[in-house]
Every structure is written in C-alpha cells, then in structure tokens.
Image: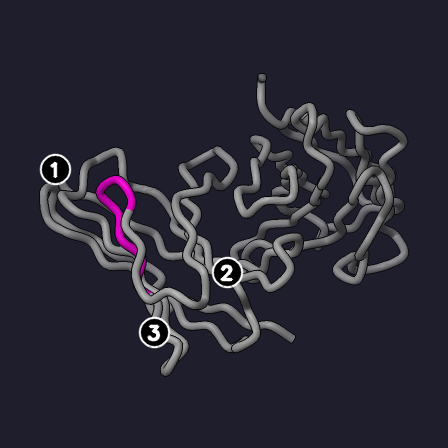
Amino acid sequence: GESVGLHLPTLSVQEGDNSIINCAYSNSASDYFIWYKQESGKGPQFIIDIRSNMDKRQGQRVTVLLNKTVKHLSLQIAATQPGDSAVYFCAETNTGNQFYFGTGTSLTVIP
Amino acid sequence: DAGVIQSPRHEVTEMGQEVTLRCKPISGHDYLFWYRQTMMRGLELLIYFNNNVPIDDSGMPEDRFSAKMPNASFSTLKIQPSEPRDSAVYFCASTWGGLEAFFGQGTRLTVV
C-alpha cells in the first residue's frame, strides 16, 4: 500500500528564518501531493498542492518542491512567523478522493 | 458557511459502551471522509462517501466500527463496543471532489 513518511518529527526555527519541511513518499503512481497545516486543537488545513508533472509550485510565502527521482517532497516557508508553529503533514493521492497522510512534522518558531 | 461541524468535541466513555460521532459536511460537498488520528499512526483514512454512498471502507479497523450517511448533510461513525485502543481524535472532512479537503475540529475520544 501507499506509504508517506517524514524525515524529521520536529523542527525549531528562529522567527524570520526560512523553514524547510521534508517528506518522503513511496507510491510513484500518485498524481498529486498536498501539504496540510494542523494547529493545536484544530483539524488539518490545506496549504498547497503540486501535481506530479511539476517540480515546483509557489504560494504565498510557501514553496513546494517535488523530486520524483528520489520520491521526495519539501515545503519551504519563507520568513517564518510565530503563527506558522504547527504540525505539517504531506499527503498523496492518485484519485483526488483518497488522501494518504504522513505522520507529521512539528514546527516550532522561536521568537 | 460554518465549515465542517463535528460533535461532540470531547467524549469520554467506558469500555464496552457504544459511541456515536457526528458530522455535518459543508453544503454542496459530495465527498465525506472519516479519519482517525493518533500519535503512533498519524492520520488514517477510515472510510469515505460519495453522494452519501460508502465507496471505500477498507480503513475501518474492525466490525466494531460502522459509518452511515443517511443524507447529504449528516454522517455518523459508530463504535460498538468501544475499547481503550479506540482512543484517538476522529476527524470528518468534506470536499467537492477537489484536492482541498475541509476538516472539522475533530472529536477527541477517550475510552477508559
């Protein structure tokens, strides 16, 4: 079955620095990869997605990079802010209906 | 729209009791998902519906778990009988078929 995992369970960054959160996946057939943010006590919230035929996509302060050769996905957050402190999940899907989530990386922003 | 609404937010029950979790998806969304979240296993997809019809329930752990969607605005996840290992946060999410799933606030279930 699909397997989506994260390299690091926790990450601490200084406010204003850039953050990079990594994710490894195993299903080469996935069409889309998605990043979600989960704040304490809340449900996950969509951040950005990338299609498998792309290698980079930018949003507001976030960039997702996809390296299909090594099955690696990363989320870069520019000028990290205290409000970015959360758990970040990558997810994959090849149907658009079933999403398989990794175990998450906890990001802590140090003021 | 108020978003996906789940109830209750917290549930504490004794082992062996029946537990029913409820979800109201966003109006107009025709996909509904139930997830379970634990520290050890992360977010696990339990079951999802399309137009009120269960499409894939392969993630439902055991026969003790059942889910229904009697209409487009309501779904339940039932555990009977509950066990301590069922303790987790259960999330409901809905989509219109796109990539952005909208999650509820979750129900934290504790079985003692």
The quadrant where residue B76 appears: top right
Residue A67 disc label: 3
Amino acid found under the numbered disc labelled 3: Asn
Q: Does residue A101 show up?
A: yes
Residue density around tag 2, few if under 14, some if 14–19, many if 20 or more, within 10 Å? some
Q: Is residue A60 magenta?
A: yes
x, y percent for residue A44: 49, 41
Q: How many marks?
A: 3
Instruction: Name the chain letter of the residue that bears numbered label 2.
Output: A
**Horizontal relation, residue B55 to residue A101: left or right:** right
Q: Give the amino acid type for the residue marked by disc 2 in the picture.
A: Tyr
Say which residue label 2 marks: A32
- Kindly give the residue lying farthest to the front in the view shown: A53
User: Circles 3 and 1: CB distance less than 8 Å?
Assistant: no
Residue B4 image-quadrant placement:
top right
Query: Is A55 on the left-hand or right-hand side of B31?
Result: left
Segment colored magenta: A59-65
Circle 3 SS class: strand
* First reached walking from the N terminus: tag 3 or tag 1: 3
- Between disc 3 and disc 2, whose residue precedes? 2
